[in-house]
Image: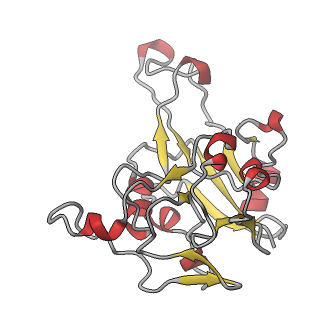
């Protein structure tokens, strides 16, 4: 099994529900966003004004690309970053020493660093309703702490494909929150899965493939390219 995701850019409406759901379900501290949605500019061969002057805009959601060849894992001096048996790149919060080598190595800029203890943030009344909405218990993968709503200050963080949910067969929070069903999650090794079918039948691309990172997040190109 290799868990992966397909994001249909024709369906993404840029509402950022994925980012908000991700933040709430994973108790992310202030200033931390594991999921972000960008509005591509000229470098993505798109603009806000399309053919015949009609208004058109596309969006690019970006989170951890769950690389098969993750640079962040290679540079971690203590083995805090590792890949589990399902192909998900995780971080052991108890082993992380906060050196931030992984932040420098990630070519996608998706690694985040927790400067503030979430327990301190929750003490500030009115900061964010539902801040500790995440899965109610810590989750350990083979003894490694890879999810906790009360992460210590000074650890590197990123998307985990919502390991606290997917371990029970559920989809990540961002997939469930997307109102336009732009995100599809499943087993890349199963030729019958929807993600495998879409990759096989549709035009897809991956971010910075030339670096050899082998991301497990695939994008479906917009059906009607903006001119």
Please tell me whether residue 225 is drawn above or below residue 69 in the rendered image. above
Choose between 14 and 110: the one closer to the eye: 110
User: In the image, 49: left or right of 221?
Assistant: left
Quarter holding residue 188: bottom right
Identified at 70% across, 56% down, the residue is 66
Quarter holding residue 224: top right
Counting every numbered tag in the picture gives 0
Identified at 82% across, 52% down, the residue is 69
Is residue 194 visible in this depiction of the protein?
Answer: no
Residue 40 % position (x, y): 52, 28
User: In the image, 1: left or right of 186?
Assistant: right
Identified at 55% across, 78% down, the residue is 164
In which quadrant is the C terminus drawn? top right
Is residue 199 visible in this depiction of the protein?
Answer: yes
Please tell me whether residue 17 is drawn above or below residue 88 in the rendered image. above
Choose between 82 and 170: the one closer to the eye: 82
Residue 64 % position (x, y): 62, 52
Q: Residue furthest left?
A: 125
Identified at 56% across, 45% down, the residue is 62
Q: How are the residues colored?
A: secondary structure
Q: Residue furthest top?
A: 52
Please tell me whether residue 226 is drawn above or below residue 34 in the rendered image. above
Please tell me whether residue 5 is drawn above or below residue 167 in the rendered image. above
Residue 181 % position (x, y): 51, 58
In which quadrant is the N terminus drawn? bottom right
Residue 175 % position (x, y): 52, 63
């Amino acid at each position: 099994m290799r868990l992966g995701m397909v994001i249909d850019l024709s369906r993404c409406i840029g509402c950022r529900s994925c980012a908000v759901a991700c933040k709430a379900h994973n108790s992310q501290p202030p200033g931390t966003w594991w999921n972000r949605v960008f509005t591509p500019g000229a470098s993505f061969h798109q603009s806000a004004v399309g053919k015949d002057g009609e208004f058109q805009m596309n969006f690019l959601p970006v989170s951890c690309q769950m690389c098969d060849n993750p640079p962040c894992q290679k540079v971690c001096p203590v083995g805090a970053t590792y890949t589990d048996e399902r192909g998900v790149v995780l971080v052991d919060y108890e082993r992380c020493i906060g050196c931030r080598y992984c932040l420098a190595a990630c070519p996608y800029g998706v690694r985040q660093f927790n400067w503030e203890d979430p327990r301190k943030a929750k003490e500030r009344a009115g900061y964010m309703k539902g801040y500790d909405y995440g899965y109610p218990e810590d989750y350990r993968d083979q003894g490694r702490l890879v999810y906790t709503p009360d992460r210590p200050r000074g650890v590197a963080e990123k998307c985990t494909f919502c390991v606290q949910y997917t371990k029970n067969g559920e989809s990540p929070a961002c997939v469930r929150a997307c109102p336009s069903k732009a995100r599809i999650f499943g087993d890349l090794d199963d030729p019958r899965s929807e993600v495998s079918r879409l990759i096989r039948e549709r035009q897809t691309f991956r971010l910075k493939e030339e670096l050899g990172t082998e991301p497990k997040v695939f994008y479906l190109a917009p059906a009607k390219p903006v001119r």
